[in-house]
Amino acid sequence: MSHNRPGVGMTGFASMAPAPVAQLAADELDDVERAARVLSGKRLAVLTGAGLSTDSGIPDYRGPGSAPRNPMTYQEFIGSEANRRRYWARNHLGWSHLRHADPNAGHAAVALMERRGLLSGLITQNVDRLHEDAGSVNVVDLHGRFDQVICLENGHVFSRRLIAAILEEINPGFVAAALEAGVVEMAPDADATVEDPELITSFVMAVCPICGGTLKPDFVYFGENVPKGRVERAYAMVDAADALLVAGSSLTVQSGLRFVRHAAKAGKPVVIVNRGTTRGDEFAELKIELGVSGVLDYLARNLPELPGAKEPIGV
């Protein structure tokens, strides 16, 4: 694979080679085979979180070893120009790094499950769009997508690439200066902590190229509601499935946990693959604390075909 190959999915910005599939040890295979038995013959809804993208070089929010974070809320963003400036400065730096992330074996495995007709759909809490880059089609980007920017005044939508080019033009040398000053932390939503406060205060924000309105990355902030249509489509995927597979999510926020509760209430088995405790453990028929990519790869290759498999819903 060429190191500089173009992106293979809808976003088209992937350029780094994916991490290889982690080999499962003999004792780990026992747990994965148990998961395969629980899920065998069932049409699956899949819910993924930040733990799936760690093999692509994107940090987790709450996994083992993750640094504590205090993300900006929606109310803070809209309530203060200084907050917006700080956020956009950090996001511009984070985008310059995370836009090069490439799908890993876990993303490829989920896309394979979809091609094999094993899925009713995919719900992801991630905004990185790596599922789409890997080839998944029937996806609910529950928390939005970081390759788009929206205007809060009139709803205009722009590609993140366009806004990044504008920001680079009006802030020449910012990324290089910020990297020299030292980046403390990168987050899954492309937020980056920068040590030099003067860089933040000197950052020039872009405005909507059409109306001059306030711009915001097109994903759901803490304190902001997930759009109703996305939630309804995700529930429909769970309702159309026979089981729910959760991969790489701590289920800390209600936006993902509600689907686990919904599946369990309907009597559908829930299998959770995640390192560390999740808020959904009590609802799971099986919990596996292993690397997500290796488990998904095994399931994608070893789950049996479904007789009379239907086309994925919503395609």
Image: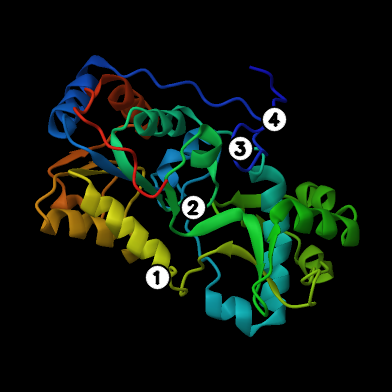
- Which dot, 2 or 1, sits closer to the camera? 1
Q: Report, in whole angstroms, how far the alpha carbon at label 3 lies from the one at label 4.
A: 12 Å
Q: Report, in whole angstroms, how far the alpha carbon at label 1 lies from the one at label 3.
A: 29 Å
- Among numbered discs 2 and 1, the one appearing first in the sequence: 2
Quadrant of residue 145 within the rendered picture = bottom right
Q: Amino acid at mark 3?
A: Ala
Query: Given contact means CB atoms under 8 Å apart, are the residues at marks 3 and 4 in contact?
Result: no
Residue at 63% across / 43% down in the picture? 11
Q: Amino acid at mark 1?
A: Lys
Q: What residue did someone put label 2 on?
A: 67
Query: Split into 4 quadrants, where in the image is the N terminus?
Result: top right
Q: What residue did someone put label 4 on?
A: 6
Q: Residues within 10 Å of mark 2 (few under 14, many from 20)?
A: some
Secondary structure category for the residue under label 1: helix
Residue at 47% across / 69% down in the picture? 222
Rendering coords of residue 251 (x, y %):
31, 55
Query: Given contact means CB atoms under 8 Å apart, are the residues at marks 3 and 2 in contact?
Result: no
Rendering coords of residue 67 (x, y %):
49, 52
Q: Is residue 32 left or right of residue 154?
A: left
Q: What residue did someone put label 3 on?
A: 101
Is residue 189 depicted above or below 157 in this figure?
Answer: above
Q: Report, in whole angstroms, how far the alpha carbon at label 2 lies from the one at label 1.
A: 31 Å
Q: Is residue 253 visible?
A: no
Q: Is residue 24 left or right of residue 78?
A: left
Residue at 64% across / 44% down in the picture? 98
* Numbered badge on residue 228: 1
Secondary structure category for the residue under label 2: loop
Q: Is residue 188 visible?
A: yes
Q: Report, in whole angstroms, how far the alpha carbon at label 1 lies from the one at label 4.
A: 34 Å
Is residue 93 depicted above or below 36 in this figure?
Answer: below
- Which dot, 1 or 4, sits closer to the camera? 1
Query: Given contact means CB atoms under 8 Å apart, are the residues at marks 1 and 4 in contact?
Result: no
